Image (cartoon, rainbow, N blue to C red):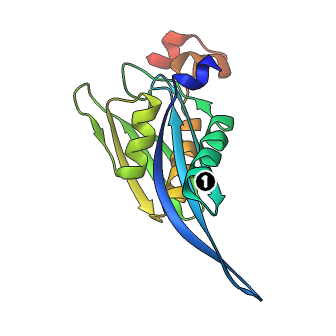
Amino acid sequence: MKETLELQNEVIDIRRVAKVTKGGKNLSFRITVVVGDGAGRVGIGKGNTREIPRAIQQGIRDAQRNMLSIPLKEGTIPHEVEGKFKAAKVILKPAYKGTGIIAGTTVGTICRLAGIQDILTKSLGSTNPLTLARATLAALQQLRTPEEVARLRDKKLEEILG
């Protein structure tokens, strides 16, 4: 329970959605939430209920269940990476110290809550916040440290770094 207290969350998107039935339209709200600890752990979740506060709580629980750890290197990411989810594509590039987070709202929020301080990003294709968030997480999942790459290739760290 202590871990839950140090997590930060932020609502990215609130959408009113309707399910059309024989009896009319059933209106509800779909909320997209990002949860992160600012030290390399981040997750996204979505909640869908008739009331916004309950949808937010549902989204936070979903995001906490789907958290992943990402390797950070001096406030940025170790290497360039590209993530795709459906029609969204996100390119993440490491940046020099002091650059800041150069990103749109959705990708920037995810990077900030993950603990990344310097990064360059570009999003292509779909601008839907949920799809963009999932593409960003797909990109962050591909990150590897130099030590991991050396171990996977059965080489020494010096051979990988050059």
Looking at the picture, how far across and down is residue 44, in whole percent? 57, 44
Looking at the picture, how far across and down is residue 126, in whole percent? 48, 65
Of all residues shown, which one is farthest toward the left?
98
Q: Quadrant of the C terminus?
A: top left
Q: Is residue 14 visible?
A: yes
The residue that appears at 39% across and 30% down in the rendered structure is 116
Which residue matches tag 1?
A: 55
Looking at the picture, how far across and down is residue 94, in whole percent? 36, 33
The residue that appears at 67% across and 22% down in the rendered structure is 152
Q: Quadrant of residue 65?
A: top right
Total numbered labels placed on residues in the image: 1
Looking at the picture, how far across and down is residue 29, in whole percent? 58, 64
Q: Secondary structure at mark 1?
A: helix
The residue that appears at 65% across and 21% down in the rendered structure is 1
| Front residue of this view, candidates 56 and 13 | 56
| Front residue of this view, candidates 79 and 26 | 26
Task: Give amino acid for label 1.
Answer: Ala
The residue that appears at 59% across and 59% down in the rendered structure is 51
Q: Is residue 83 visible?
A: no
* Picture layout, residue 159 above or below residue 32: above
Residue neighbourhood size for the residue with mark 1, other residues' Cα within 10 Å, grouped as few (<14), some (14–19), many (≥20): many
* Picture layout, residue 149 above or below residue 16: above
Is residue 121 toward the left or the right of residue 81 in the image?
Answer: left
Q: Quadrant of residue 75?
A: top left
